[in-house]
Amino acid sequence: MDFKELLRTLRRRWKTIVAITLIAMIGSLFLSLRSDPLYQSVAKVYVSADTSTLQDQYAANVYVQQRVASYAQLASHRVLLARVADESGLDLTAADLAGRISAVVEPETAILDITVTDTAPDRAQKIADVEASELVKFVQQLETPSTSEHSPILLTVTDPGTYNPNAVSPETFLNLMIATLIGLTLGVGLAIAKELLDQTVKSATDVEKAANVPLMAAIGYDPSVEKSPLVLDISSFSPRAEAFRLLRTNLQFLDLDHPPRAIVITSSISGEGKTTASTNLALALAQAGRRVLLVDGDLRRPRVAQLMGMDGSIGLTTVLVGRTKLEESIQRHKESGVHVLASGPTPPNPSEILQANATHDLLARLRDAYDIVIIDAPPLLPVADAALLATAADGAIIITRHGKTTRDQLEGAAHRLAAVGARTFGVVLNMAPKRFGEMNYYYYYAEEAEPSGKSGSGKRSSGSRKA
């Protein structure tokens, strides 16, 4: 993953990063607010040598330096803590004091810093005072030899326990900053992990790597598609209308010398929106003044007639088996002028029908009769129907759903077409997020513009037999 891919990942997965960071911050605030405040008191004890017992001053200083670290350890000795508990007059035991008292030697000195941490500042001060005085007695008792009445070590309390009304813990702001950094780190790590594990198609780069063809258009996600799947006014300012205008334009520049006249619209798997895409592409081409025929070549799950509000009882299958004539089977969509050849009754053997010579001959007739023929075909991976139709047409466009179709599925679909010698013009990424790649500029523009178009649900009858 290079730097640009990392930035794209962070942009796509920003919700994950923000969510993890917020959870860490909220957790930190909750724990900080729930924690009891802690206060500290510090007492200082100076350690020196009794020069009356140690004649050499240098030797005395060395002796002190050797012993002072041990005295810091003795500050938390259980015997000393028991004495402190008794002398303090507080309702505490040696075990209670064990986790509250610590002592360290100030660097390059013979001074002990005794720190007491407690939930009350006055109690912390009291314990620090008693601890310092009792440590002096305890050490001198230990250091006094049995043959002498004097200890070679002298301990002096230089600073009694301090009173500090300011809590040292919890440090809410510091905890919040640390939690934020941890949350960001975990969020970015999780986002990268999800991106590496996510094998779905989400970008033009994914399309080009998987299918070795360009991304022709990206159709943005629109929650109103289910109720209004048709874009009846392609000149409107809606993002979907712009997407189909872009697809229409790209089709016109596929091959200027030999423009395609028959195009199969298919997908890798079901549920990627190929029928809606093929229907709206036909509408876009018709509104550009092209004479367009939309053929429902999905003989297994036909939906074009239902989407366009037309009669699906006659169509492609009835023409191929000779039950109806082609001219009387084609219907005209009144609002758009698109001619439609529905699927007709579902046959028991769709693949056999589609690979018959009659199908190739029919498509040749239709190619001559119309400026362009759009064929809605079944998905490529489950069945061979779309590949068969693509061999009879000029090529195919694969509809891929953002975040659903995997790169392996798209690659497999492209290989299916290549295996039969069919041309793949490109890929259309359906249900792309609103901020998808290069579409950003248009979306900002469209949101500020006043929509003037209309869309249709396709539920009412809007077709008539071609005269």
Image: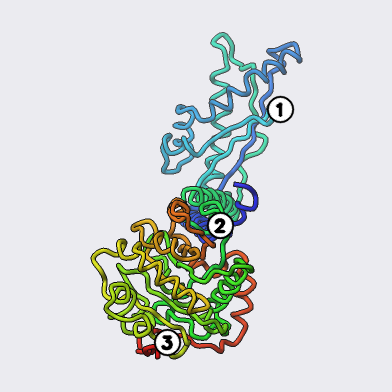
Q: Residues within 10 Å of mark 2 (few under 14, many from 20)?
A: some
User: Pointer 1: residues within 10 angstroms few (<14), some, or many (20+)?
Assistant: few
**Amino acid found under the numbered disc labelled 1:** Thr
Residue 361, horizontal then vertical, whole percent: 40, 69
Q: Quadrant of the C terminus?
A: bottom left
Kindly give the residue lying farthest to the right in the view shown: 57
Q: CA distance from mark 1 to mark 2?
A: 75 Å
Residues 363 and 43: in front is 363
Q: Earlier in the sequence, mark 3 or mark 1?
A: 1
Task: Give whichever of discs 3 and 2 has the lower sequence position.
Answer: 2
SS class of the residue under badge 2?
A: loop
Which residue appears at 44% of the width and 58% of the height? 405
Front residue of this view, candidates 135 and 110: 110
Checking the image for residue 333, the label placed there is 3
Which tag, 1 or 2, sits closer to the chain's start?
A: 1
- Is label 1 in a helix, a strand or a loop? loop
In space, the residues marked 3 and 1 are separated at their CA atoms by 97 Å
Q: In the rendered image of this protein, does residue 322 appear above or below residue 75?
A: below
Q: Looking at the rendering, which quadrant does residue 452 occupy? A: bottom right
Circle 2 sits on which residue? 213
Q: Nearer the viewer, mark 3 or mark 1?
A: 3
Q: Position of residue 198 (x, y in %)?
A: 47, 52
Vertical order, 332 against 17 (above or below): below
| Residue holding disc 1 | 109
Give the Cα distance between marks 3 and 2. Answer: 33 Å
Q: Nearer the viewer, residue 422 or 120?
A: 422
- Kindly identify the amino acid type of the residue bearing the numbered disc 2: Val
Q: Quadrant of residue 67?
A: top right
Q: In the picture provided, is 337 more to the left or to the right than 329? A: right
Q: Given contact means CB atoms under 8 Å apart, are the residues at marks 3 and 1 in contact?
A: no
What residue sits 56% from the left and 74% below the top? 248
